């Protein structure tokens, strides 16, 4: 809170002191500002062993950023969505993801740029390994607070964030049941544990660094702490998150070879120890890309035996073995879990169809029987997933800004209970997304 207020005071002071001598050019700041937006029409259809539901969304994202004025700028972004024809069963299934009608001001910030440092204070999108919004749903998650990004050190980016409120992707996620647009609340979502509904917290901050000083190698590290998080109905305490990653790409004749490795972990204060959310996840990936339009990769990850992993503040935390639509936090961060993924991509530009790309994924997980309750896992049980996914995206060359995307996922969940009785459930999901950016 203190960091946010100080940042706000600093920005206003700078603006006041410079506007005195540049009053005649202030109008140009708004005239030269940039408007950008996106129109969205999405259709989702989900089929399980016993149900079939679908929902349609029509949405607008509209943003405006002023030109700089002695380093100062202002930005706003409005998100608006309607879910016409949504039936009762669809509202229930998609209440945490797509059922949300109305508008919300997701960005409203003052910024200041000085040299290679940029400061933002207010509502803003954030996308880092440990503090991140998920943009795969109709409402993008957003955060209220302050951020600083500095690039003074050669080949290095240092970033810091402070957040005091968040905006989820539906009103239900934020604790309301009216089906309206999500609002900013003194709550946050913690991916991997209580990722369905936001929980109360005081505030959170993070510090990270990205270094590219070694040719073809990118190193990333981040630490984040959320204070007085109500992960339990009976107790609150601090939550610490850690992340490190290495990405190495080596160009060869006719293709590129890549190696990736990351480690993420979570630690809770003593009041929350009994939740067993002090887990870690170690992941690795080998990939081949730019092979005459083809790419292929194999990834594997493993987690702690008795603790689940909190992946991020906000639902944007990811892993190498997650799958499109269903994956980042319903399969990979479980305790005592091994996960694997094979992915193949193809760019049809090599076949004289520019703008058309394909992604195919096969993922499977193997969880041992739980010795304790941890995260969403229950003592004496185990759950395994097998998932097939395909994504076809077409950015139409002669209609600049328009993209059509078709995603289809088949997922089998195999639950073994304390009596070794196995229950299998299948979920098939189809997404069609039509987007126009301007």
Image (tube, helix red, strand yellow):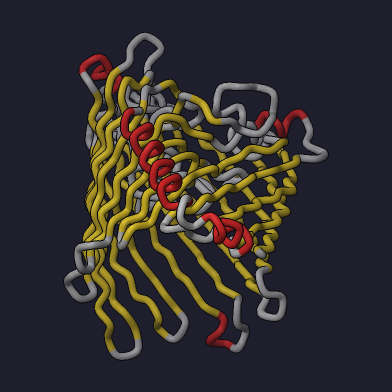
The quarter of the image holding the C terminus is: bottom right
Q: Is residue 168 left or right of residue 35?
A: left
Name the residue rendered at 60%, 77% in the picture.
355
Residue 361 lies, in percent from the top left, at 47, 61
Near-viewer residue (344 or 379):
344
Q: Is residue 328 left or right of residue 59?
A: left
Task: State the image quarter where residue 131 is shown.
Answer: top left
Name the residue rendered at 48%, 27% in the picture.
198
Residue 6 lies, in percent from the top left, at 34, 35
Residue most toward the front?
21
Residue 281 lies, in percent from the top left, at 26, 44
Residue most toward the right?
85
Near-viewer residue (67 or 266):
67
Name the residue rendered at 41%, 75% in the picture.
295
Name the residue rendered at 27%, 74% in the picture.
249
The quarter of the image holding the N terminus is: top left
Decide if residue 174 is in sight here: yes
Work out whether 82 lies above or below 194.
below
Residue most toward the left?
214
Work out whether 219 lies above or below 84.
below
Residue 373 lies, in percent from the top left, at 32, 21
């Amino acid at each position: 809170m203190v960091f946010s207020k100080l940042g706000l005071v600093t920005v206003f002071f700078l603006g006041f002191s410079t506007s005195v001598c540049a009053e005649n050019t202030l109008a140009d700041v708004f005239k030269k500002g940039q408007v950008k937006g996106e129109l969205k029409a999405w259709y989702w259809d989900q089929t399980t062993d016993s149900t079939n539901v679908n929902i349609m969304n029509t949405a607008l994202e509209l943003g405006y950023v002023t030109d700089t004025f002695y380093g100062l700028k202002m930005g706003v972004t409005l998100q608006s969505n309607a879910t016409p024809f949504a039936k009762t069963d669809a509202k229930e299934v998609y209440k945490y993801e797509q059922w949300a009608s109305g508008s919300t001001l997701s960005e409203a910030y003052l910024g200041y740029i000085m040299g290679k440092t940029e400061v933002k204070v207010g509502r803003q999108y954030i996308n880092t390994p440990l503090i991140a919004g998920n943009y795969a749903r109709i409402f993008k998650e957003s955060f209220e607070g302050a951020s600083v990004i500095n690039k003074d050190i050669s080949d290095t980016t240092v970033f810091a964030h402070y957040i005091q409120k968040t905006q989820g992707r539906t009103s239900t996620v934020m604790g309301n049941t009216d089906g309206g647009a999500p609002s900013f609340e003194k709550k946050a979502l913690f991916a991997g544990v209580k990722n369905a509904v936001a929980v109360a917290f005081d505030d959170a901050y993070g510090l990270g660094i990205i270094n590219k000083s070694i040719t073809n190698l990118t190193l990333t590290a981040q630490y984040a702490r959320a204070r007085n998080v109500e992960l339990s109905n009976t107790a609150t305490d601090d939550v610490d998150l850690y992340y490190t990653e290495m990405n190495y790409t080596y160009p060869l004749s006719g293709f590129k070879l890549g190696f990736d490795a990351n480690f993420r972990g979570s630690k809770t204060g003593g009041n929350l120890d009994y939740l067993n959310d002090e887990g870690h996840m170690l992941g690795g990936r080998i990939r081949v890309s730019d092979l005459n339009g083809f790419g292929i990769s194999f990834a594997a990850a493993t987690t702690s035996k008795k603790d689940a992993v909190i992946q991020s503040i906000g639902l944007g935390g990811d892993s190498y073995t997650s799958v499109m639509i269903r994956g980042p936090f319903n399969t990979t961060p479980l305790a005592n879990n091994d996960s694997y993924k094979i992915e193949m991509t193809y760019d049809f530009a090599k076949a004289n169809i520019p703008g058309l790309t394909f992604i195919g994924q096969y993922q499977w997980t193997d969880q041992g029987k739980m010795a304790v309750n941890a995260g969403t896992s229950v003592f004496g049980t185990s759950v395994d997933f097998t998932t097939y996914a395909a994504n076809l995206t077409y950015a139409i060359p002669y209609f600049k800004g328009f993209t059509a995307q078709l995603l289809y996922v088949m997922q089998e969940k195999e639950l073994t209970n304390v009596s070794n009785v196995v229950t299998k459930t299948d979920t098939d999901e189809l997404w069609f997304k039509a987007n126009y950016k301007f």
